[in-house]
Image: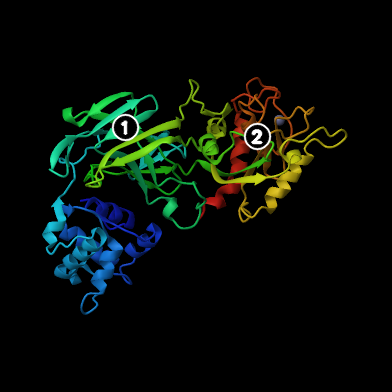
Amino acid sequence: MPDNTEPAALIRALDAVGVDFSIPEPVLRDFLGNAEFTPYPALSAGLLKLLESRMLRRPVFLDVIVFNYEHSPGEPSPRRIEDVDFGVLEGAVLEGFNNRYAEQNVSFQTVLKPLDAPQPPVQTLALVVEGTKKVENGITLVDTDNPRIEVGTKLISVPAQPNNVTVPQEIVRIGNGWRFTNGDVELSVSNGEAEAGLRPIRAGSLSEGANAWPTTVGTFSGATGADVRLQARIRVGYRPVDVKLLVHGRKGFAANTAEKARIALDPDVLLVPIEVARFFSDAIPVQQISAASQMALWDQVPIMSPTTNLKSTDGGTGELQFAERAWDHWPVPDNEGLYTHLGWVSPDSIWGKAGIRFRLVNYIDIKTDNEHAAPGPAPGVVTNATLRANNATLNDHPQHIKDKPVVKVIFMHRIAPPDAPQIGEALVGSSCIGISAGASDRFATIAHEIGHLITGSGSHSTELNNVMNDPGPGTNITDAQIALARTWAKQFADFWVH
Ligand SMILES: [Zn+2]
């Protein structure tokens, strides 16, 4: 039996039998988690029992059902499933159904249909998690906060309305695009820090779900019971997340009895919070820098193509016909295991060797004048004066994270006057680095500047291919640099405490 007592799991279980909601999801989760003061847990459990092996033929809002139930004669508001009157509950559902679809059904049976869950239940064939170090107490501990997850499943045929014919699920992948016919699939991510209420709560800091797509190009069909391997990328923190493959039928999720995986960041890994600010002007837009591209750079979060991301539903039955998507960017490590984006080596790929991972927790667009997006010639003036001014502006910005230490990364078109050599610069002591987004020589620049914050100095390494080499930083770090980096990164531990 799946555990249906957690709010997120309850919402999925209700969705699978045709019960959705019209109030904000966080509010619903609060209600579902509060059996003492709301009837939501009792009535949800009652609905799952009432609809066992059946489902509503069109969705009805849970909050409307609860309202109807509580406004029935005697104004009942049960706190335990034992107190639920199933006759009253049927009436509450029927009334919600009729109101929503302007129908006049008089019998509860007429708003039902057989459960649209694929049978047999979807199997999870195997699960592979990138960066796995060990499994402890059922929790897979990983050395990266952004693992790629690979999971296998078997495609089947599912019932389709209006005539309840059976149609095969099918996935076709071409390049970085794919189409799932007669269903959809995703990786659900629950119980993680995104639900913890406090940090990290910044937008985009953690995923609650991820699109899954085939690991190889080809056509996979339920007509032949094809096994298909699917992959997704998620973000994890120190608190374990529950990861589960959810395969949709044409209506709702399939019953999935597969064990969920519990994944957490290894506590030995030190997570460093990153705040990115883009300083741009009308004339100097500092292109390429965006929240999505920074998510990809720091956290290997893939970028969905805005033009290819659609779901098609049948106008008559409301059933899902197909989902079609494509990635603009899907992160893949190179031959040396380095992730790069826009020509920059992901700082994780270098400092990860020290057990340090960076996570984007804040992104701010700051409109400024041309001089502060790309300083002009300034003879006799300190070359980092404009970067320092931008750092001061960022410190005063209302969206800047002030209450906990973060590493600030300022992108400008050019951080110093045209005749200055800098394409990156660390403001040691200010926990800030500046990066010239207009420079073409990118490679390990960001990791190099972070290295200056780590060492607390402007000095360089003469070792070839060391990240602190100048000019031309490489990707190696020494044992001494690892020790320094780990000491430095511990100052951010408090950011993740909640
Ligand atoms: Zn340097």
Q: Of the residues under marks 2 and 1, which one precedes in the sequence?
A: 1
Q: Position of residue 469 (x, y in %)?
A: 68, 25
Task: Identify the colour scheme used.
Answer: rainbow
Relative side of 461 to 19, left or right: right
Q: Position of residue 488 (x, y in %)?
A: 62, 42
**Cα separation between marks 2 and 1:** 43 Å
Residue beneath disc 2: 451
The label number, if any, that marks residue 179 in the structure image: 1
Q: Is mark 2 within 8 Å of ligand 1?
A: yes
Give residue 372's mark: none
Q: Position of residue 356 (x, y in %)?
A: 54, 38
Q: Nearer the viewer, residue 393 or 24?
A: 24
Residue 454 spot, x, y in % from top left: 65, 38
Q: Tell me which amino acid carries mark 2.
A: Gly
Q: Quadrant of residue 56?
A: bottom left
Residue in the picture at 17% in, 67% down: 91
Which element carries disc 1, helix, strand or loop?
strand
Amino acid on which disc 1 is placed: Arg
Residue 45 visible here:
no
Residues 428 and 201: in front is 201
Residue 261 located left or right of residue 107: right
